[in-house]
Amino acid sequence: MLIAGGSFWAVSSAATGDAINSAELVTQLDGHGIVEPSLSTALLSGDPDAVANLDRIVHERVLGDRVVRVKVWTGRGRVVYSDARQLIGRTYELGDDEEHALATGETDSELSDLTKPENRYEVAFGTLLEVYMPVHAADGRSLLFETYQRDAVIEADRARVWSGLFPALVAGIALLFVVEVPLSWRLARRLERSGRERAALLERAIDSSELERRRIAADLHDGPVQYLTALSLSLGVTAEALRDPSRAAPDSAALVASLDEAGDRSRTAIRELRSLILEVAPADLAHVGLAAAIDRLAATARDSGLMVRVHAGNVPSLSPDVNALIYRAAQEAIRNVIKHARASTLTINLVQHAGAVVLEVVDDGKGFDRDQLQRRRQQGHVGLSLLEDRVGRAGARLTIDSAGGRGTTVRLEVSAG
């Protein structure tokens, strides 16, 4: 609508300007080509024959349907000639625009003010356009030549220009509309689809967060809470045996065994709590770096009794998102090895290969098949599912190679760009 409105306004202004230019061109042709050669010294002195000669020329060659009045002025405002004979010899004050035209030699125009005394004989013609320009008499004196043209003729010229441009304008706007509608429709569909995708991502993020909280709660319940409960019961039984005088006091070997068992359970609980802390509040990768953060994960695996080997090659500087993805993949894979694999050795490789960064977490544990993985997911173990979902959104590639009795290899491949 703005383009259409602006286009119509521009065409209307151009048509009006062209019509006024035509009126000024007519005045220039009449002034220089017809009237100026007859501006003799006798005419300037008011000679009746000179006036009659010019009057005849004006009526024959200038006045008509377009031009209805002609005036010739001196620079002091005296009317040297007019087809309205009553004005000849009279003096009126020239306007600023008229004086400017005389001084600069330009042609100018304006709507005639029919209330001025010098224009009282044009009232019967209705709205008129005054066009004035400088001409020169035979003695070189500058005079002001002025025509009064019917506004209806000017409007006809304007309408002619407008009618010539209007079909092309309408066709152009119609073409713009035809081109714009499919583009707008496509953009609207794209925005709608983008909105649905954002909503789906938000829902997925909320679901993932909820699943992650449930998993941490389950890990706390099944791990540290169980160990601390057993530790509390064991220490309580030992304390009760020492406190009750009616019961035989446990010998030193039994006390050492009980305390050793309590120490093992407390260390196990501490190790699992430390692992959960790393999951809830992971390392500051920007501060410590990816290699150091993976070393911390490896240290947690060593605490659990695994023999761990870490090989980190010359990995390029990566974006924060890529660093976070690699770290999360290593964290989930190492966590699964500690809790489920029953492995003795764990190997972590981080290398650059063919424009990509490759992470491999390899264990020699019991492994699993796809059916076991599906059952674990149905039981609420969704760590790998969340990781696969995150990897997919990042455009990376995650493969899990495992089978019963031959360990597991988790491989993440992500672009280094």
Image (tube, grey):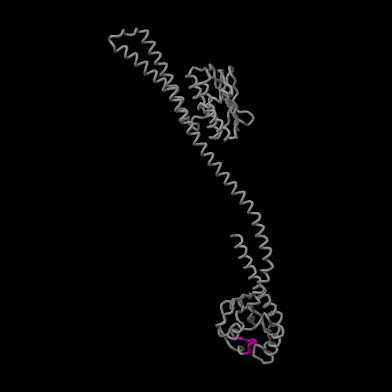
Q: What residue do we see at 69% from left, 82% from top?
A: 64
Of residues 299 and 226, the one nearer the viewer is 226
Q: Is residue 259 above or below residue 135?
A: above
**In the rendered image, which quarter is residue 152 located in?**
bottom right
Residue lying furthest bottom: 48
User: Horizontal and vertical percent for residue 405?
Assistant: 58, 17
Q: Is residue 95 above or below residue 197?
A: below
Mark count = 0
**In the rendered image, which quarter is residue 130 located in?**
bottom right
Classify the position of the N terminus by image quarter: bottom right
User: Horizontal and vertical percent for residue 171?
Assistant: 68, 61
Of residues 209 and 169, the one nearer the viewer is 209
Is residue 88 toward the left or the right of residue 202 in the image?
right
User: Horizontal and vertical percent for residue 269?
Assistant: 42, 21
User: Horizontal and vertical percent for residue 276?
Assistant: 45, 26
The reply to whether residue 331 is in sight is: no
Is residue 304 toward the left or the right of residue 408 in the image?
left
Of residues 362 and 42, the one nearer the viewer is 362
Q: What residue do we see at 42% from left, 16% from top?
A: 264
The reply to whether residue 214 is in sight is: yes
Q: What residue do we see at 59% from left, 88% from top?
A: 90
Magenta stretch holds residue 211:
no
Classify the position of the C terminus by image quarter: top right
Magenta stretch holds residue 80:
yes
The magenta region covers 78-85
